[in-house]
Amino acid sequence: MSLQTRLMTAVIGFVSLILVIVAVITSALLGGTLEQQLQDKVMNYSGQVTQTVGSVPAKYADVDAIFEGQGSRVPPGILMAVSSTAGGTSGIVFPDTKGELSGVSQPLTSADLERIDAALDGRRVGTVTLDDFGSYLVVVQQAPNGVNVVTGLPRTDIQNQLTTLLTVIVLATLGGLILLALTTAITIRVGLRPLRAVAATATRVANQPLDRGEVQITERVPAAEADPRTETGLVGASLNTLLDHVNASLAARQKNEERMRRFVADASHELRTPLSSIRGYSELSLRALKQQGTEAAIEGTTTSLERIQAQSLRMTRLVEDLLLLARLDEGRELVHGTVDLTQLALEGISDARPTAVDHHWNVEVPDEPIVIMGDAGRLHQVVANLLANARTHTPAGTSITLRVARQGDDAIISVHDDGPGIDPAVRDELFARFARGDSSRARQTGGTGLGLAIAKAIVEGHGGEISVTSTPGDTTFAVRLPLTPAAGVDAQPSA
């Protein structure tokens, strides 16, 4: 069964059980109260009748004498019977409508008298059902003259009242249950509407092709059905949050796929040029070898082999850089030990200065050395890449400053230049692999576009971060490294 059906069945079933219990208890209490009132009334009449019978000799004590003594004070429907050794047993019943004594009463048969005697059976109060008169509550008392006097009143009024009460309860219960069913159905349907909206949204999302191409999940649970203040609305709000995360993840996946495609295209382009050169110079060498003995052949062969070697070295550097990035991505290739960043900066600026004598090189380091835990060789590569990047993309006369400083629990290495700055269009992709296209910088030398990507991977492998800020005349690459080693890293002396 559905949740709505189960809830309605449970609610209506429990309410019906409660109403039945209430009806039974109410009927029992009311019936007991009415029975007690009727018994008190019968006892009152029985006392009067017994007093009248006790005032006459036993042989004259019969039912007619009782009637004559009571006169018109007897209530309608009253039953009276006397039993004595002198006068035998006799009884009479008045009809339900009060009338004269003569001509309106009906005598009790011997069978009726036997039933009354069996109903009492030594008890003072009993209930008897007579064929012609219905159910009676009877009381027996003994008069002072030894005569047993039985007085009874019909239980018809009690039965009628109980029947009326039960009828009213049944009708009210049925009406209440119908109203309860309608109210419960509407309440549950409205309460479960957010769940139906969640199911519909999930179904629409499930029918979308999410395994290929650029995917944008626009389906959301309506805001009216995603109210976090309600339990069912919280489900809708949670699904919307989940869909936001899934949508962001799919966008990131698509972006990574596009980046991977660009990576493959750039790698193919980088490899194609040296491969074409190697092929061309190989063919040239083969033709030159066919002309053995000539000076031109020797010179051509030597030139071709030199070019083949140069292109092979270029391919080797590219493959080594790609291999380094792959190993850094896997958390390998770093050997941690103590590294003096001050000494590292001085060595880096000394190596960079001869490569660009037309630039102004500056270094700013503190008096006290700044020592961290890291891989000295790889951190030297980071500094060298940042200095080479600044040298390559700035014109002659540019001032390049390498700074090392302590900032809280971190060490900061920054490379600043006053060159033309970085084009904002490529700034976000600056640390991507094979990132190129910086139109605001003059590219003077070729490269693979992996230098900054390698620097970023090395810095992140040390638990640090690298960032760049750039405006025309003010560009700074900043590397932030923790002074304390990451958890689980054992310090080893660095070469």
Image: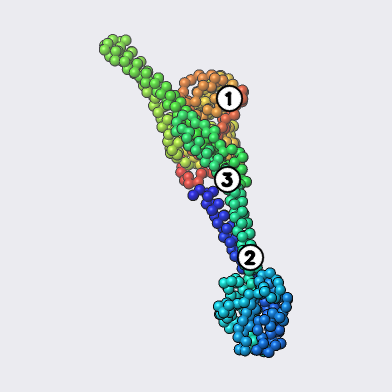
Judge from the rendering whether residue 156 lies leftward or rightward of residue 212; answer left or right. Answer: right
Q: Report whether residue 121 is seen.
A: yes
Q: Looking at the image, is mark 1 or mark 3 nearer the viewer?
A: 3
Mark 1 sits on what residue? 424
Q: Residues within 10 Å of mark 2 (few under 14, many from 20)?
A: few
> Taking 40 as reference, is 483 above or below it?
above
Going 69% across and 85% down the picture, which residue do you hit?
53
Q: Which amino acid type corresponds to the residue marked 3 in the rendered image?
A: Arg
- Identify the residue at the far front of this view: 103
- Indicate the colouring scheme: rainbow
Distance CA(mark 2)–CA(mark 3) = 43 Å
Q: CA distance from mark 1 to mark 2?
A: 96 Å
Q: Residues within 10 Å of mark 3 (few under 14, many from 20)?
A: some
Cβ atoms under marks 1 and 3 closer than 8 Å: no
Q: Earlier in the sequence, mark 1 or mark 3?
A: 3
Question: For the residue carrying disc 1, how many other residues have a C-alpha within 10 Å: few (<14), some (14-19), or many (20+)?
Answer: few
Query: Nearest the camera: 125 or 15?
Result: 125
User: Which residue shows up at 59% across the image and 49% down it?
Assistant: 182
Looking at marks 2 and 3 on the same chain, the residue that comes earlier in the sequence is marked by 2
Q: Amino acid at mark 1?
A: Pro
Q: Considering depth in this image, is 447 or 25 the residue closer to the camera? A: 25
Instruction: Please name the residue shown 70% across and 71% down the image.
Output: 98
Residue at 60% over, 71% down: 133
**Residue indicated by mark 3:** 189
Residue placed under numbered mark 2 in the picture: 160
Foreground label between 1 and 2? 2
